[in-house]
Image: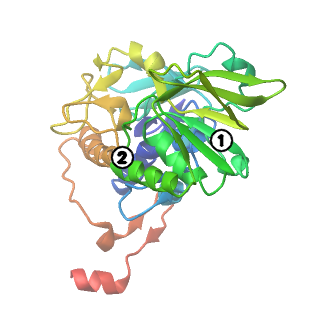
Amino acid sequence: MIKTDILIIGAGPTGLFAVFEAGLLKLKCHLIDALPQAGGQCSEIYPKKPIYDIPGFPEVLAGDLVDNLMEQIKPFQPGFTLGERAETIEKLDDGSFVVTTNKGTEHHAPIVAIAGGLGSFEPRKPLLDNITDFEDKGVNYFIKEPEVYRNKKVLIAGGGDSALDWSIFLADIASEVTLVHRRNEFRGALDSVEKVQELKNRGKIKLITPAEVVGLKGTDKLEVVLIKKVKSDNGKIEVAVDNFIPLFGLSPKLGPIANWGLEIEKNAIKVDNTLDYQTNIPGIYAIGDVNTYPGKLKLILCGFHEATLMCQSAYQRINPGKKYVLKYTTVGGINGFDGSKKEAPKAVVKAIE
């Protein structure tokens, strides 16, 4: 049985940052994730997608953010159970928990932090009769490696941030980018909408709105996408393509966690955000996109904040009555479990003193 102080379910950015905050408190962490590598959606779905709202990084690729987080937590030597799904949980008489995976691996900890992002998920696929015939033959639901689309004719469908951001990103890679949306208005960030409009004006992106993809044609692979303008009787538009990428979001599911007795609201775990993001079961927390509370924002930076407060609360549960004095890393450096210490620069320490 694997024993740890905080068992984190989900090894995405929020779960990884929780390791860092716990490490500063001398708490050991172990992470479980159904994916074969750490990083969650940032690694599995869009490692090359740029993220713009991480403090201190005007722009950072999702995969690079994961790499940086892994480097940041290295001094604290977390454990990982990857490629296994957290299946069942048992609360012991002493208030601690045993979580068992679908492969029978048992984990014991006084604290469980669910950082499962959107949970298990599947892409929302357009209702096209033959779309499965072209999956991995021109139809893709995620963009993992943009270089695959270099000098290719790419058609993206969708009206959210992913569709806008990838259209912008691929404009300098693909030979032709076409963006199709069923409305004239987009629901993504205003800045991204303006960039798409600018690229359209420069001839870098073809924009077809309001319209929908209604058919796919090809022999051994996808060759043509059929588009119909909304509320128009002018027939279908045929667009020659190499790749069709429908980006309609993900259909999230909590999976086995939904059966753990937690209070669920709209496929998310309700938490108390007035203090520490604890669930209705004492000792079990939920942080990041998997939780919900009044005013919740599904942003990575919000998950980082939630992870920080969760770790402070976990420290008090594990060490009842023990006073913890917050120390800034600019003063105290980082003490790892391996005995190493990264000191702050002397000039910085002197200025603070």
Q: Position of residue 125 (x, y in %)?
A: 56, 22
Q: Which residue does the numbered mark 2 point to in the structure image?
A: 189
Q: Which residue does the numbered mark 1 point to in the structure image?
A: 154
Where disc 2 sits, the SS reads: loop
Q: Nearer the viewer, residue 132 or 336?
A: 132
Decide: few, some or many residues near mark 2? Use Cα within 10 Å; few <14, some 14-19, many ≥20. few
Q: Nearer the viewer, mark 1 or mark 2?
A: 1
User: Residue 103 falls in which quadrant of the image?
Assistant: top right
Where disc 1 sits, the SS reads: strand
Q: Position of residue 123 (x, y in %)?
A: 54, 26
Q: CA distance from mark 1 to mark 2?
A: 22 Å
Of the 4 image quadrants, the one containing the N terminus is: top right
Q: Is residue 348 above or below residue 152?
A: below
Please tell me which residue is depicted at 40% across the width and 65% down the height of the picture: 334
Q: Position of residue 72 (x, y in %)?
A: 48, 59
Residue 67 in sight in this render = yes
Along the horizontal axis of the image, is 170 left or right of 268? right
In the image, farthest residue toward the front: 234
Along the horizontal axis of the image, is 91 left or right of 277? right
Q: Mark 1 or mark 2: which comes first in sequence?
A: 1
Decide: few, some or many residues near mark 1? Use Cα within 10 Å; few <14, some 14-19, many ≥20. many
Q: Nearer the viewer, residue 230 or 61?
A: 230
Please tell me which residue is depicted at 63% across the width and 43% down the height of the picture: 144
Badge 1 vs badge 2, beta-carbon distance below 8 Å: no
Please tell me which residue is depicted at 20% across the width and 31% down the height of the picture: 272
Which kind of residue does numbered mark 2 sit on?
A: Ala
Please tell me which residue is depicted at 59% across the width and 39% down the height of the picture: 44
Q: Is residue 145 above or below residue 121?
A: below
In the image, farthest residue toward the right: 220
User: Residue 186 falls in which quadrant of the image?
Assistant: top left
User: Residue 117 falls in which quadrant of the image?
Assistant: top left
Which kind of residue does numbered mark 1 sit on?
A: Val
